[in-house]
Amino acid sequence: MLLSPGAKGILALLFTFSVWGLSSLYYHLLAHVPPLVVLCYRTLGSLAFFAGLLAVQGRLGEVVAALRTPRKLVLIVGAALMISLNWFGFIYSISIGNALEASLGYYIFPLVAVGLGAVVFRERLTRVQVAAVALAGFAVVLLTLGLGVAPWIALGLATSFAAYGALKKGLDLGGVVSVTAEVTVLAPFAVLWLIHTDTVPGIGTLGWHDLGLLAFSGLLTGLPLVLFGYAARRVRFSTLGLVQYLNPTLQFAVAVLFFGNALTVWHLTAFPLIWTALALYSASALHADRAARLARVPL
């Protein structure tokens, strides 16, 4: 039985968010490697993956053209900075054994993105969306007061990814072309850092087992992004928005069940508040999607 395009899209989404949600297990294997070194190999591995894909498609010229356009170059550099901060924050959180805060960051990201859209793009928010953002903000404040320190990693992950999305809105490039341009900008800095830290293959302190794991990060980063782009063209935006919560949910489960991250009373209070905020936001998004589809139905 052949699957419909929508069903294929949902399967691609489930695979993508499952890989992202379980990727903390992979990066935990590299917890002994300095986070910046892991970031460098992830950057170079991603460049190899995406550049190879575009080369097969005969589209490398699109990357060169984008980098030669001043306006696009500024946005690409900004996006590259934001995605590198996001990747580093996640890698760092796993290296210090705080996967729980990483999951918190990706839970609150959609709500940070909504707030950023209202401030930067003057997007109008419904009352439900305002309530959802306010509730998430209250949860973060409560967690900060309870733990005595703000969840900086979570806030950094959510903010950097929201800013990344905002910058990408101004880039009229395909997803693969855009990411390839971004890691191309980052690649020279990655190479220089690896040389500086003597972690270049064959001459550094890393063994071949570690180098093999690091090389795999390119595929682990690239393949889900390609599948995400495939799925985004075949499923409704509201479906995509709901399925994306599989990522932080799996991260949460891994943090608690595998890494033994402690759930304090403040976590047990803040997380349900954020889940409630996400439920409100998702209900609002589903309502808007349904209203838009009904408006397109001819009378």
Image: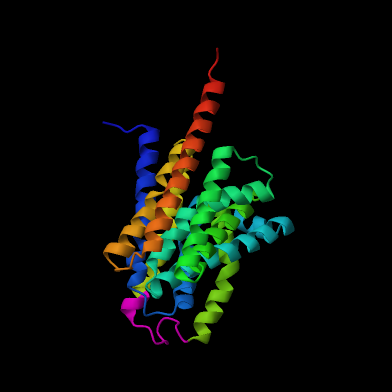
Residue 205 colored in magenta in the image: yes
Q: How is the image coloured?
A: rainbow
Question: Is the magenta region chiefly helix, strand or loop?
Answer: loop
Q: Quadrant of residue 5?
A: top left
Q: Nearer the viewer, residue 288 or 189?
A: 288
From what the image shows, is residue 110 above or below residue 199?
above
Q: Residue at 43% across / 70% down in the picture?
A: 93
Residue 3 colored in magenta in the image: no
Instruction: Report if residue 227 is visible in the image.
Output: no
Q: Residue at 31% across / 58% down in the picture?
A: 253
Q: Residue at 51% across / 52% down in the picture?
A: 136
Q: Quadrant of residue 69?
A: bottom right
Q: Residue at 37% across / 58% down in the picture?
A: 268
From what the image shows, is residue 147 above or below residue 63?
below
Residue 272: x %, y % from top left: 40, 52
Question: Which quadrant does the C terminus fall into?
Answer: top right
Viewed as shown, does residue 158 lie left or right of 30? right
Which span is picked out in magenta? 198-211
Q: Quadrant of residue 130?
A: top right
Residue 54: x %, y % from top left: 51, 54
Q: Nearer the viewer, residue 77 or 256?
A: 256
Q: Residue furthest right?
A: 70
Q: Nearer the viewer, residue 20 or 160?
A: 160
Question: Which quadrant does the N terminus fall into?
Answer: top left
Instruction: Report if residue 94 is visible in the image.
Output: yes
Residue 198: x %, y % from top left: 47, 87
From what the image shows, is residue 4 above or below residue 146?
above
Q: Nearer the viewer, residue 244 or 112?
A: 112
Viewed as shown, does residue 253 lie left or right of 269? left
